[in-house]
Amino acid sequence: MDIINNKILICNCEKTMNIDGDALAKACSSETGCTVHQNLCGSETHIVLDQLKESLNTNKSLSIGCTQEQKAFNQIAEENNFEAPKTFNIREFAGWSHEGEKSMPKISSLINSSLKVNKQTPSITLESTGRCFVYVDNNKGGNPIEVAYDLCKKLSSHLGVTLMINNIKDDLILEPSNFKITKGYINKGQGYFTKFKLEINNFAEALPSSRSKINFGDFYNKVDTDCDLIIDLTESTPMFTGSHKRDGYFRASTNSPSDLFNIYTEVIEMIGQFEKPIYVNFDENLCAHSRNGITGCTKCLDVCPAGAILSIGDMVSIDPGICGGCGFCGSVCPSGAIQTDYPSLDIILDSLSELSNKFVSAGGKDPALILFDTIFGNEMISLISRYGKGLPANVIPYEMHSVGRVGHDLLVSLFALGFKKIFILINPKNSEEYTFLPKQVEIANSLLSGIGKNDKKSISILEETDPELVENEIYQTSEYTRIKPSPFIPLGAPRGILRASIQGLSKSNNNKNSMIPLPEGSPYGKVDVNLESCTICLSCVSACPAGALQDNPDAPQLLFREDACLQCGICEATCPEKAISLVPQFNLSDEAMSAEVIIEDKPFDCIECGKTFGTTKSIERIIDKLSSHSMFEADGRTEMLKMCEDCRVGAMFAQNDKMLEAKDRPKPRTTDDYLN
């Protein structure tokens, strides 16, 4: 089957899928008919080879509908000096289902989506020389030292290995080895794959002269060492936050041979140069973390499970070596300073928009979406398709590097693109990391409820390890939204995408309310200024990191642009009069995108020279506060506060008495004063 400049091979996997070739070709708007093959990975491999040759001659890319046998197809291409074909999954995602015969629209949308070429993500180069540090605790049950020793012995044929034993006994007997044996305990660990740094206490190396038992040299504290890989067999507290996301750091029990074998097979390949994606883009100019020592937004710091984000003054810093690409920071960042780039939000939505459009144009109805990650989610869907009913014909799967990027902006935009129900599949083992997700769903539901009749169950978080329970949930059709979609082109920053989607939904659902109330902690809203207390000192303007609060250089005015407000709270904490409070809401009107005057005052002119040097309210407030001060008790002294800085100095020196002279200082009281 030909689609534009692509050659597509479809296989029904030995007739385990019922695929109508003519119907599929029509659904895909193919330039040619579609031949459905039965065993491309076995008896029909010659067809793959022929198509590789033809694709080279016609300058077309070859794609095969089978991800399971990708290695076999790559091998055929490599043996014959052809470029490896692409693969896509229609079996577990669509064909293996009780509704497989009705899945033609979904299969066509999956095929078209697979042909899209995504933007390359920038990367950093990591170079490993194979320095492997194995750490074991002798106080654990079983024979931890013997198991760790055997593992190191096997690893030493491939890597440079150091074994360190904590709580070692004096009568340790081990055979001679070609790797280092040390003892001590790790006091502190930091870094990432290829650049781990360890601080070790009670460190000592085994002496090469050891005979019947291992003898160690002198002890040292706070010994620093570097390594590329760490295998932690202590079964104690992990060395790193979010240890499962720290590349190059492996944890296992010495009582689990299967885990040790899996680690062995993985680490022996971790030598040489590696490209690691830079998962996020960070614009420090948009960061609302802090201003002038006053902390505002800490959302990215609060949710990062890997400890890759640190506070550095008014901004945060992201270590790309530590970052595992979970996407949590991109979901919660109110300003768009941190944007996920693996891929970015606009690319994700563009792909999902195409999936929805192709599904509907091929005759599909009520498209639903299940978002899942590459490891747990893929396995769960595979289990459902192999042992259960498979995915419903209208539930479109979308694989992400991590579902952590599922924020309210993405969710609202998906309903605008036409999806009627959204399932978010997360690993229950890591559910404690996803504490932010219910809040994102709450914000999305509040936005949707503000523009139409919204079933708050149309967004479902699935946290089950039982495939049957997940299957039962995704076959529920009673909670599909009634909100009418409003397709749009997702471009720009997340806040701009959200505004475009929610305004489109508001229009398509005939919403007349321009103001949507939101839950506390939402990144949209206004500032409520107490007009009686505010003196227009403009402290909030200089503190606002987003430029939502502005001044007028030509008049004493405080202006506010609502669509820029992040609700970070820095203005509230900065205001000396405590005149500002936050109101979470979303303003749908276009007026929110322009600065409006909140409060204004008359300019105050110097009573001597007429120079404008302040606002009437601020000068009156200063006079009121200082009138009872000893320096201003005498008649006429407060008049100086109505003068500009130049005239005030002249008036002070013109005084016959000493303006700055205070009352006599009270004499210090002694013990005798109290006794007498």
Image: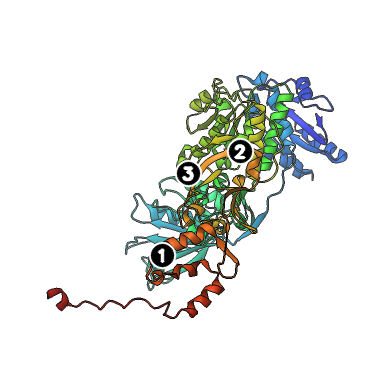
Label 1: element kind? loop
- Horizontal and vertical percent position of residue 592: 63, 42
Identify the mark at residue 433; answer none if there is no mark: 3
The image quadrant that residue 538 belongs to is: bottom right
Residue at x 84%, y 26% (from the top left corner): 32
Q: How far apart are marks 1 and 2 (CA)?
A: 56 Å
Q: Foreground residue, 355 or 662?
A: 662
Front: mark 3 or 2: 2
- Horizontal and vertical percent position of residue 10: 74, 28
Residue at x 43%, y 45% (from the top left corner): 256
Which class describes the residues within 10 Å of circle 3: few (<14), some (14-19), or many (20+)? some
Q: Distance between the residues labelled 3 and 1?
A: 56 Å
Which class describes the residues within 10 Å of circle 2: few (<14), some (14-19), or many (20+)? many
Label 1, on which residue?
A: 627
Label 3: element kind? helix
In the orientation shown, which residue stands out farthest toward the front?
A: 635
> Against 220, is 439 above or below?
above
Q: Can residue 611 be seen in this view?
A: yes
Label 2, on which residue?
A: 410
Residue at x 60%, y 57% (from the top left corner): 284
Q: Which quadrant does the C terminus fall into?
A: bottom left
> Against 202, is 268 above or below?
above
Horizontal side of residue 520 vs 106, given as left or right: left
Q: Distance between the residues labelled 3 and 2?
A: 19 Å
